[in-house]
Image (cartoon, helix red, strand yellow):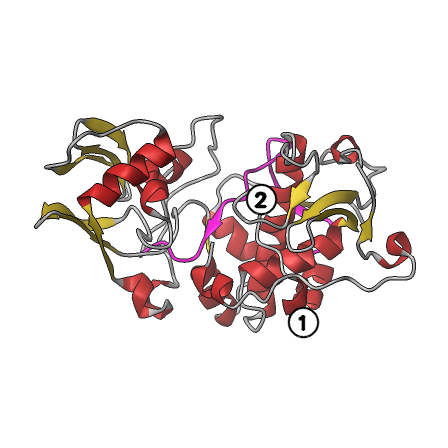
Amino acid sequence: MNAAMRKVLAGAVCLIFFSALALGCAEPFLSPPREGDRIPEPGDKKAREPVITLYNKEKGRVEKIKMEKYIEGVVAAEMDPTWPIEALAAQAIIARTFTLKKIQEGGVEKYNTDASTDEQEFQAYDAARINDNVKKAVARTRGVVVTHRGKYINGWFHADAGGRTAASAVEGLNYTKEKAPYIHSVKDPGFKESPPENRSWRAVFPLSEVRQKIQNSLGRDPGLIREVKILERGPSGRVTKVKVGNLTISGPSLRMALGSEVMRSTLLSELKVKGGRLIVAGKGFGHGVGMSQWGAKVMAENGKSAEEIINYFYKDVKIQKVWR
């Protein structure tokens, strides 16, 4: 998730409407049922664009919204709306796929909705940032998704892979819920054009803070921290296992505990204790799994289509249209 994008989020604005279903705008209603059972399977010849239930965090209420209108708000929030249309189109395809799969898996149980505008619960969303570029990208890819063996893939993406994407979802995310054979490690074409804070970053944490953050995040106490050691790295070089005090945890778990915008990745060049503080340094921004947004930007600038971008970052996948 792109921190540069999140810093400029102005909050979702109210969607103006006369007939919500006709115009694809948001419609508030009380205690709505989830709409997940209406999500079409890939290959369904009778599939139509779904209307989903969305918890709008900024407004504190649940709304109905057409899927394509929702995807516009996601693309606008997750990627710079001024970027090339083919990069935005790739983001739209991945965001649509991510949304459909997550709804099929149960949506957002906290609100009994299909989706949420809170990126900690689902994806970022900002209707105020939608521009003509975003509208064109979403319209060009209307109903288009990514599948593997007839099922929606996990549409993982990140800002900057630090030179190379993760070899698996386990390496980058410690994700073990299901196999994701469509994830592989490739060179990130966008690394050299990414902002300096992505290419090389450093963070410092007081050890007392590290202990408390791990306890809060994982519910386990690492004890008095005198040493932090890297125990294991994955094929792309990402830290997959660390020992903090007397506790062994995954690299992604440490990142989530310390803050994913501060410990920007697990592609670490330094992890040590010095002077009562934990020093962490590395490159890249994000978990490194799937599509690099900066990579997508550079590929689009070099004339690659959204489909070519997706087929580069994911292997053995099919890009198909579910609804028209």
Please tell me how crowded label 2 is: few (under 14), some (14-19), or many (20+) other residues with Cα within 10 Å.
some
Q: Which residues are magenta?
A: 141-162
Q: Nearer the viewer, residue 313 or 26?
A: 26
Q: Is residue 137 left or right of residue 316?
A: right
Foreground label between 1 and 2: 2
Instruction: Residue under label 2, please give it.
Output: 122
Q: Residue, x 35% and y 69% (percent of image)?
A: 195
* Residue 145 within the magenta-colored segment of the rendering: yes
Neighbor class of circle 1 (other Cα within 10 Å; few <14, some 14-19, many 20+) is some
Q: Amino acid at mark 1?
A: Asn
Residue 65 at x, y percent in the picture: 78, 50
Amino acid on which disc 2 is placed: Phe
Q: Which tag, 1 or 2, sits closer to the chain's start?
A: 2
Q: Is residue 243 left or right of residue 306?
A: left
Residue 251 visible (yes or no): no
Q: For marks 1 and 2, give the CA distance.
A: 22 Å
- Residue 96: say if magenta: no
Name the residue located 66 percent from the left edge and 59 percent from the top edge.
73
Q: Secondary structure at mark 1?
A: loop
x, y (%) of residue 302? Answer: 48, 70
Asked which secondary structure carries label 2, the reply is loop
The numbered mark at residue 131 is 1
Q: Residue 187 location, x and y as percent?
A: 35, 54
Furthest-left residue in view? 275
Q: Residue at x 42, y 44 (%)?
A: 289
Along the horizontal axis of the image, is 177 left or right of 60?
left
**Position of residue 212 measured from the top left corner of the image (x, y, whole percent):** 28, 38
Horizontal relation, residue 50 to residue 171: left or right: right
The answer to which quarter of the image holds residue 150 is: top right
